[in-house]
Image (tube, grey):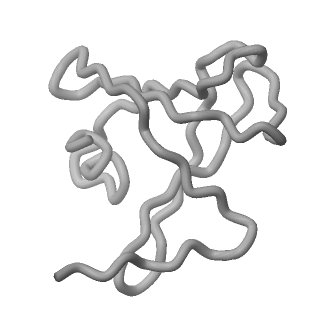
Amino acid sequence: MKTRLEVPPGVDSLKVVSVRHYTNRLLSFRVERPSAFCYRSGEFVMIGLPSDTKPIYRAYSIASPSWNNKIEFFPSRCRGGALTEHLQKI
């Protein structure tokens, strides 16, 4: 049985609410926006995945408007990319 890894302090754990695969290299996904999270369109956030040793974090630009209650991203797959290889599987 797989053990759920702890989320570090100051990091939000968000649920992916929708995924759309455009090609085998490009997808979009949306997460619920935390109520206290404010941003301007085009700003970036660090997205990460837990691992057994150390979380993997990468910067992604926010593609959704600032008034939306969902945050949308359009990552493109980088062959051998530490995070995008995992994101392609969501």
Query: Relative to 53, is 31 on the left or the right?
Result: right
**Picture quarter containing residue 42?**
top right
Q: Residue at x 62, y 17 (%)?
A: 64
Residue 63 higher or lower than 57, as above or below: above
Q: Residue at x 29, y 20 (%)?
A: 20
Quadrant in the picture for the N terminus: bottom left
Query: Residue 56: x percent and y percent?
Result: 46, 66
Count of marks placed on residues: 0
Quadrant in the picture for the C terminus: top left
Residues 82 and 65: in front is 65
**Picture quarter containing residue 66?**
top right
Residues 38 and 47: in front is 38
Query: Residue 6: x percent and y percent?
Result: 51, 79
Query: Residue 13: x percent and y percent?
Result: 56, 57
Query: Relative to 23, is 54 on the left or the right?
Result: right
Residue 61 higher or lower than 87, as above or below: above
**Picture quarter containing residue 88?**
top left
- Name the residue at the bottom extreme: 53
Q: Residue at x 48, y 28 (%)?
A: 30
Query: Residue 10: x percent and y percent?
Result: 75, 67
Query: Relative to 16, is 65 on the left or the right?
Result: right
Residues 35 and 28: in front is 35
